[in-house]
Amino acid sequence: MEVHVSPDLKAKIDRWAAETGRSAEEFVEEALEGYFDELDEARRTLDSRYDDLASGKVQPIDGAEALERLREKSKAYRAARHG
């Protein structure tokens, strides 16, 4: 497979490859493998969350309610940290 990248990205890849002591090909392959591993993990997480919603195991909450809960948690966290 041949991959074409912009000159700016090529320069970044070459710099990182030089800093890590690996070839550009090895560096790109490792980076892509890591990216797809993370993408796969995110997809499994989302699928699991969807299954939980579809089965009724968890109930959705309104966006405004979710935001308010986050604000309250943040407020409590800051209060605990600052005495």
Image: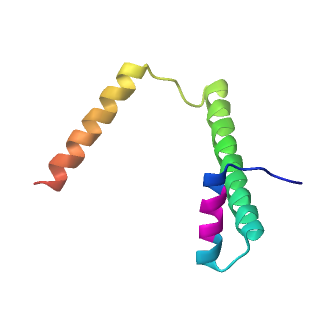
User: Farthest residue toward the right?
Assistant: 1
The number of discs equals 0
User: Farthest residue toward the left?
Assistant: 83
Query: Residue at position x 69%, y 44% from top?
Result: 44
Q: Nearer the viewer, residue 69 or 17?
A: 17
From the top left corner, tell me how far across and down residue 68 is, in percent: 30, 27
Boundaries of the magenta span: 10-16
Query: Residue at position x 61%, y 27% from top?
Result: 53
Query: Residue at position x 67%, y 49% from top?
Result: 6
Overall secondary structure of the magenta stretch? Answer: helix
Q: How is the image coloured?
A: rainbow
Q: Which of 8 and 49 is in front in this view?
A: 8
Residue 14 within the segment the image draws in magenta: yes
From the top left corner, tell me how far across and down residue 40 is, in percent: 71, 48
Q: Nearer the viewer, residue 13 or 35?
A: 13
From the top left corner, tell me how far across and down residue 77 is, in percent: 24, 48
State which quarter of the image contains the N terminus. Answer: bottom right
- The answer to which image quadrant residue 22 occupies is bottom right
Above or below residue 39? Residue 66 is above
- Image side of residue 76 versus residue 6, left or right: left
State which quarter of the image contains the C terminus. Answer: bottom left
Q: Which of 33 and 26 is in front in this view?
A: 26
Above or below residue 53? Residue 46 is below
- Image side of residue 34 versus residue 3, left or right: left
- The answer to which image quadrant residue 63 occupies is top left
Query: Residue at position x 72%, y 62% from top?
Result: 28
